[in-house]
Image: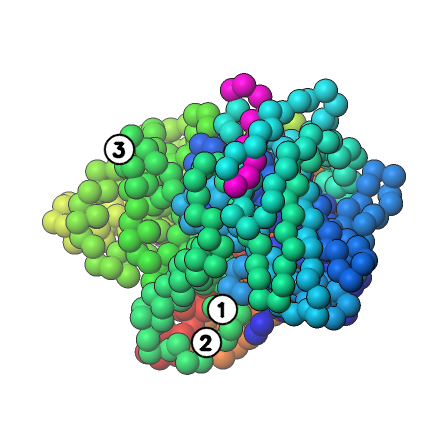
Amino acid sequence: MAIEFGRDLCGYLETAEKREWLVTNGIGGYACGTVAGLPTRRYHGLLIAALDPPVGRTLLVSTIDETAHYNGRIYPLSTYRWCNGVVNPTGYRHIERFRLEGTTPVWSYAIADALVEKRIWMQPGANTTYVQYHLHRSTQPLTLWLKVLVNYRDHHHHTQGWGWHMQVTAVPQGIKVQAYSDALPFYLLSQEAESTTAHDWYYGFDLARERDRGLDDRDDHLHAATMMMTLTPGQSLTLVASTQSNPNLVGDVALQQRQAYERKLINIWKADHRTDVEGTPAWIQHLLLAADQFIVNRRTTKRPAGKTIIAGYPWFSDWGRDTMISLPGLTLATGRPEIARAILQTFADYVDQGMVPNRFPDAGEVPEYNTVDATLWYFEAIRAYYRATHDEALLRELFPVLADIIDWHCRGTRYGIHLDPSDGLLYAGEPGVQLTWMDAKVGDWVVTPRIGKPVEVNALWYNALRALAQFARLIGKPYQEYEAMADRTAARFSRFWNESLGYCYDVLDGPDGPDAALRPNQILAVALTDSPLTPEQQRQVVEVCGRELLTSHGLRSLASSDPRYQGHYGGPVQQRDAAYHQGTVWGWLLGPFVIAHLRVFQNPTQAREFLEPMAYHLQAHGLGSCSEIFDGDAPMTPHGCIAQAWTVAEILRAWTLIQQHTTS
């Protein structure tokens, strides 16, 4: 399935500004924007550089004010909405076609009988963005005037430019910009165009998506350089924005390198899935490329080649929970176990008091450990890695870390996390802290307090014990204690079963007693490798989740029959966070549901059908990728991050498992 649009979408601002593209560089930097070319978020820009990879993400190059001069007329190619509500210029009207070539967005601008193509991509491993204009056809020369607008701010912030004077100087083949004395200089370069310096602020860009989120909706950018070139048919102009002073300026070569990089990813996957490639739909191959966008470098003192996973674009950094859930789908399902190995080793270095970090802050501060489930997902990620590779050397390396984690949980670690000796179940939580993936918190208000024994946490605990017993057997370590603990947890997991309702309690032993809310967390007790539920209970869980929680794009976080249910996600922060886990659909949960359905019903055709609506979603929000969340009510409008790691990962993992089931 090609991701491609014509004038029927590109020519209407209300549709073209809702589709967003993303390109990345593998170290945390990115560029993104809308099909219309209209910036609607503070995160839209051509070079958001990771100055402290994978974080320290800083907007350097905002946009290019583009005009084409042809046959005595001026054609604006850019589109802006200003704070007074005026849209000017309206360059989107000239977009005849938009498409993705791999992950590279391509615009075709029809200017009378001339056709100009524009491509944007990033160099892997560098804070370098390429913008290439190619004159595909014309009967006369066409002149491009490109005013490059810059900034220098954290990508979460916004700019008021009054009184800010940047140092803008001419250098060979372009312009150097230094925002202030201690700022990292960056460069706007081209080997084809004539470049001149400028220093004019553009005030009052309107950011509609930020206003929708209840945040500041105005931004200013500095016009720092103008580049001009007259093109004849077949000629190209490439503008390079980079933190490097000497990047490759040959646009065609840089594009070929990007294309070769993406072909290599596809070929690796084909080699790993050689028995079932023929029947794979094109949208799955789009997700293979999307998967790579989340994998980034995280250099540590012990591991200069360390790796991690960005949880979502454009605003998330790397989170422990998201990384471990995403690892099997992003690395193993795509045929890249060496990346998985590097991630697992990197996170081992950060284990503290038996806990994997929840979040690495974007500003590079000390990691936060406020999670109970990320550490348990770490065991699942290692288990999936071993299943794919049989790498006993890594098991031996990580076993002491894993054994120490279990020991800490048995005797107690942060936030009241401890094993209850009375029933072998894991307890977690303190007032004012949210430790599970349902982690929305507004000030001191925890929206979905789950203090006690959450169902998915204990399913993960049971699987962690089974995994560690397996690892101990494989490498000749004592395993009996872990097996005994797992048996005890399995026996007492029956406490979660609510016979009268026919599904699991969401939380046991909380301050207000057992929580019987119908939430999707129990699906993990079926989808994980070892289920502590009976076969009949597994069937009932899958069926009730299917009837009450399943949508085209994932599972609702709360049944619509619950009085707390909120079917729409939007508005200011407090309103959004109140709905975040109270009915909002989460795309990543579609994977566990499909896997659980396959386990129970052994019907790969039907399991595959549940994934197919995602093919259309790839054209609706973050193009070629999968969104973080969706409204609980139809038509399940996408929200949140335009590209979310665990959503992409779990779709790929589920698809791969279905294929393996079909061919086994």
Report the number of numbered marks: 3
Looking at the image, can residue 434 be seen? no
Compared to residue 141, the image places residue 246 above or below, namely above
Which quarter of the rendered picture does the N terminus lie within? bottom right
Q: Secondary structure at mark 1?
A: helix
What is the secondary structure assignment of the residue under circle 3? loop
Residue pointed to by mark 3:
302
Mark 3 belongs to which amino acid? Answer: Lys
Q: Secondary structure at mark 2?
A: loop
Q: Residue at x 40, y 62 (%)?
A: 260
Q: Are marks 1 and 2 in contact (CB under 8 Å)?
A: yes
**Color encoding of the figure:** rainbow
Q: What amino acid does circle 2 point to?
A: Thr
**Please, what is the three-letter code of the amino acid marked with disc 1?**
Ile
Q: Is residue 151 visible?
A: yes
Q: Which residues are magenta?
A: 173-182
Going 38% across and 42% down the picture, which residue do you hit?
A: 297
Residue at horizontal 20%, vertical 42%? 397
**Residue that label 2 marks:** 280
Mark pair 1, 2: CA separation: 7 Å
Q: CA distance from mark 3 to mark 2?
A: 40 Å
Q: Which residue is more in the foreground, 365 or 441?
A: 365
Direction left: furthest residue: 476
Identify the residue under disc 1.
Answer: 284
